[in-house]
Image (cartoon, rainbow, N blue to C red):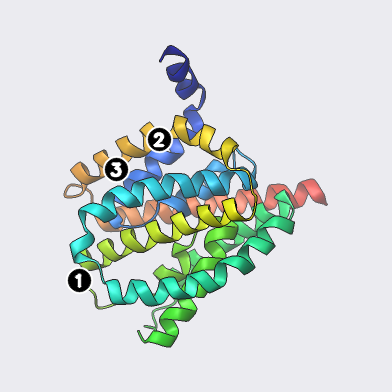
């Protein structure tokens, strides 16, 4: 136990990043991976960061998805998951052959592009089976390459008419299925998960504590303030990472 606690203390930077991301996800229904990705890459290589995030997200979404499963929109989840199964093999091929620096830039560009789209696009995408399956395919690709399968999902349903509780429950259940499938895909493809699991063990307490604190704080924190804080942090972290890699390589 003493060895484990000293390991947790040595992981203080990643621990704080995971706690903050879990806190936000518990309140909003999303945010764990999109917030943790740019922050964790200050401490880990991208090809370690992605499976670590998937393990954390799978655990967090499993717990919250189970608690809210009765409210989830399962017909939408089924159609999107079908698309995800098509998109993941393409994503795994991309993930396997891209370099660490290129993957880091790609992940942060995806984060920035998503933030911009969420802010400037107010056009509601029609919710129909074809669009849902296509979104699932994009989600499968981004899930296995960046750990952020929720980005296409959030863009697609940004202006959905689903009640907030149904939306949050659908997020949790779908993200759990996507995270679990991505991890299985890594195992089938022969990608080693042991190093990621070793880091995950030290970060798990921060995930649990962040979720609990978020659930308890939900009614006290204005959603608008949280949204602004998230956008500022992600813009700064992602832009800094991209610029630093470009300077290093050029």
Residue 203, image x, y percentages = 44, 34
The residue wearing badge 2 is 204
Find residue 115 and report its horizontal and vertical position in percent.
Answer: 48, 64
Q: CA distance from mark 3 to mark 2?
A: 11 Å
Q: Is residue 188 visible?
A: yes
The secondary element bearing badge 2 is classed as helix
Q: Tell me if 161 is positioned left or right of 204 in this view.
A: left
Q: Which mark's residue is nearer the viewer, 3 or 2?
A: 2
Q: Residues within 10 Å of mark 3 (few under 14, many from 20)?
A: many
Q: Is residue 96 above or below residue 83?
A: above
Label 1 Cα neighbours within 10 Å, binned few <14 / some 14-19 / many ≥20: few
Picture quadrant where residue 94 is located = bottom right
| Mark found first going from the N terminus, 3 or 2 | 2
Give whichever of discs 3 and 1 has the lower sequence position. 1
Label for residue 103? none
- Determine which residue is flagged by label 3: 211
Seen from the viewer's position, the closer of residues 171 and 236 is 171
- Number of marks in the image? 3
Q: Residue at x 59, y 55 (%)?
A: 188
Give the farthest residue toward the front.
188
Label 2 environment density (alpha carbons within 10 Å; few <14, some 14–19, many ≥20): some
- First in sequence, mark 1 or 2: give its number: 1
The image shows residue 54, relative to residue 10, as above or below, that is below
Q: Secondary structure at mark 1?
A: loop
**Residue corresponding to mark 1:** 163
Q: Which corner quadrant of the image does residue 44 belong to?
A: top right
Q: Is residue 244 above or below residue 159?
A: above
State the CA–CA distance, disc 3 to disc 1: 21 Å
Q: Residue at x 38, y 51 (%)?
A: 229
């Amino acid at each position: 136990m003493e060895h484990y606690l000293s390991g947790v203390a040595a992981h203080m930077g990643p621990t704080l990043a995971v706690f903050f991301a879990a806190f936000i996800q518990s309140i909003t229904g999303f945010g764990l991976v999109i917030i943790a990705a740019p922050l964790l890459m200050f401490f880990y290589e991208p090809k370690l960061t992605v499976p670590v995030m998937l393990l954390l997200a799978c655990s967090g979404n499993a717990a919250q998805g189970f608690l809210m499963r009765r409210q989830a929109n399962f017909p939408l989840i089924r159609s999107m998951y079908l698309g995800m199964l098509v998109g993941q093999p393409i994503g795994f091929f991309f993930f396997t052959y891209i370099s660490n620096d290129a993957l880091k830039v790609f992940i942060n560009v995806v984060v920035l592009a998503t933030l911009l789209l969420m802010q400037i696009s107010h056009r509601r995408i029609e919710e129909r089976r074809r669009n849902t399956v296509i979104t699932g395919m994009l989600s499968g690709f981004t899930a296995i390459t960046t750990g952020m399968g929720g980005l296409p999902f959030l863009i697609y349903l940004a202006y959905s008419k689903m009640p907030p509780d149904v939306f949050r429950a659908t997020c949790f259940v779908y993200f759990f299925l996507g995270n679990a499938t991505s991890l299985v895909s890594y195992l089938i493809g022969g990608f080693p998960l042991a190093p990621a699991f070793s880091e995950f063990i030290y970060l798990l307490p921060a995930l649990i504590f962040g979720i609990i604190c978020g659930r308890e704080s939900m009614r006290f924190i204005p959603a608008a303030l949280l949204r602004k804080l998230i956008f500022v942090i992600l813009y700064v972290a992602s832009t800094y990472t991209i610029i630093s890699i470009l300077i290093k390589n050029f």
